[in-house]
Image (spheres, coloured by chain):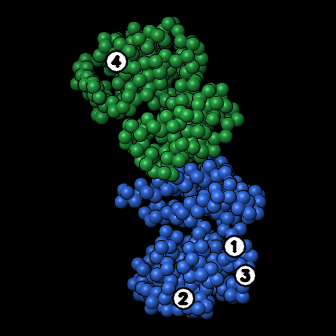
Chain colours: A green, B blue
Amino acid sequence: LRIAVVGSGAIGCYYGGKLVASGCDVHFLMRGDLPEVRRAGLRISGPGEDIHLPNIHCYGSTKEIGPCDVVLVAVKTTSNHDLPELLAPLVNARTMIVTLQNGLGNEEFLAEHFGAERIAAALCFIGVRRAEPGTIIRDEHGQIILGEYRRKPEDRTHLVAAAFREAGVNCRVTENLSLERWRKLVWNIPFNGLSVAAGGVDTATILADPALFKATEALMHEVIAAANKCGLPLEDSIANEQLRLTKTIGAYKPSTLLDFEAGNPLELEAIWGEPLRRAKAAGAEVPRLEELYSMLKSLDEQRVLNH
Amino acid sequence: LRIAVVGSGAIGCYYGGKLVASGCDVHFLMRGDLPEVRRAGLRISGPGEDIHLPNIHCYGSTKEIGPCDVVLVAVKTTSNHDLPELLAPLVNARTMIVTLQNGLGNEEFLAEHFGAERIAAALCFIGVRRAEPGTIIRDEHGQIILGEYRRKPEDRTHLVAAAFREAGVNCRVTENLSLERWRKLVWNIPFNGLSVAAGGVDTATILADPALFKATEALMHEVIAAANKCGLPLEDSIANEQLRLTKTIGAYKPSTLLDFEAGNPLELEAIWGEPLRRAKAAGAEVPRLEELYSMLKSLDEQRVLNH
């Protein structure tokens, strides 16, 4: 399997690096970190792992990479508009494009430009950050749920899942990608959103503050109800499950808070805007999600204006 | 009428100063601005007015003022806990206490400490700010709605209203203070709240941003429905009326945004917390208000923690 990783932030470098370490043929598109990774390689550390990859294949353009069997898309969703041009040189007749991105709308966007039959998605349940150029730290978990876009799993799905597993990544194949997308949003919508909208707070602060805890719970139940309206059977009990699991990870900063602190644009449409639009189109009542989206949108815009 | 003004921020100085200019016997409790006002007097400017009051009665403690006929309470609601001690020297058997403060709960608090029969409230519809010590700038409006606490207007109510009118302040007496309180909240809850929660935005920005405009409208309708559940007949049409009027005032910063920018505590409980509790006790559905309250509360707390 010739694999390309497009977008070499924390997520792309982590999963790409794990695949390299297990012997896969991986080619990274890099931007800012390219000189440092060429000089000193890629380092990944986390609970139970400490990997140094002194020589990885990394490039400044996808033209240098050329066609691949699998393209892992790990750019922020706010850069999706660059993908048609960026991915074109990587794609031949049988290339599979796997988005590792957050939220809703990414498969649809890629399908529109490259054909629905190519598209799959890997939902990444991981706490990971880039400590410095070429150095990735995994704090939490790392499992992947892999699914085909609007299709049952295929042979290639299991092949990619096997590659992840051989690389030490816990990977499950799902029959219903949309269901898993919404299940993940039950967590991302409140925690990623409130972490920024409530003034820069981590998961421990959200759980410890009675008003924010209630806001989180209420948002979770809105998202679950919206998923059900969209025909995806999520049970109410997953709110409590996710809250309980979140208590075990300590003071964790959701990726949106890291984006906000770094001055990067927020993944507004993928995590809040598109779910909101789909919920409303399905007739769900989502006042809390709507208000959260408005505030995050304004916070994002104000920040752009102030820089 | 011997009048005390307790809390000499923009609101206290503006209305107190107008009363002085019309010949009333007004005594100001001042803190930080006392030396400057003693030295250079009080200046008030605004559309159609430019007042300099070189000698006003101002003091560093209410003991120096002693009993008055009318006490105008103009401290921020976040300082209410200081009022029992602060007001005691001003109060004799027939003193009327008029709160000029925002939100819900102030009359109740004062009634608990000084007796319900003393308490009245003046709702201030004004855009006013303290440009520097002793200098007050009025940007917008200035009218007052005056009402007794849980009673019809009395002779004294009309006497105080007449004093305001003689001072050039448009003043209306209401039969139903609670109704007017909620009517004012229909504006303050969304505009004051979103101005801070959406990242520091003025009224013009809120109106121009489609998502924030929708959030404002939705909050207004929630507050109107909550008022109705509380037995106060507010019509849905006031949302549109208020939105239309707000368009005419340009880029106005609500007091909560000024508080936030100055690093002062937010009037969280008076404007959002107490209305939320009353709405829920009356069985109203207020998910947007609840979420806004949670976020403002967290923003307020985070700021305290970071200073």
- Give the alpha-carbon distance from disc 1 to disc 2, as whole Å: 23 Å
- Does residue B254 appear in the picture of this structure? no
Residue type indicated by callout 4: Gly
- Give the alpha-carbon distance from disc 4 to disc 3, as whole Å: 77 Å
Residue type indicated by callout 3: Pro
Residue type indicated by callout 1: Leu
Q: Residues within 10 Å of mark 4 (few under 14, many from 20)?
A: some
Residue at 48% across / 8% down in the picture? A156
Q: Residues within 10 Å of mark 1 (few under 14, many from 20)?
A: many
- Give the alpha-carbon distance from disc 2 to disc 4, as whole Å: 76 Å
- Determine the secondary structure under disc 1: helix
Please determine if labels 1 and 2 lie on a single subunit.
Answer: yes
The image's mark for residue B177 is 1
| Marks 4 and 3 close (CB-CB < 8 Å) | no
The image's mark for residue B91 is 2
Q: Chain of mark 4?
A: A
- The quadrant in which residue B158 appears is bottom right
- Determine the secondary structure under disc 2: loop
| Marks 2 and 4 close (CB-CB < 8 Å) | no
Q: Earlier in the sequence, mark 3 or mark 1?
A: 3
Taking the image as shown, residue B178 lies to the left or right of residue B269, namely right
Q: Is residue A145 above or below residue A239?
A: above
Q: Which residue is mark 3?
A: B153
Q: Position of residue A106 (x, y in %)?
A: 54, 25
- Determine the secondary structure under disc 4: loop
Residue type indicated by callout 2: Val
Q: Position of residue B163 (x, y in %)?
A: 66, 87
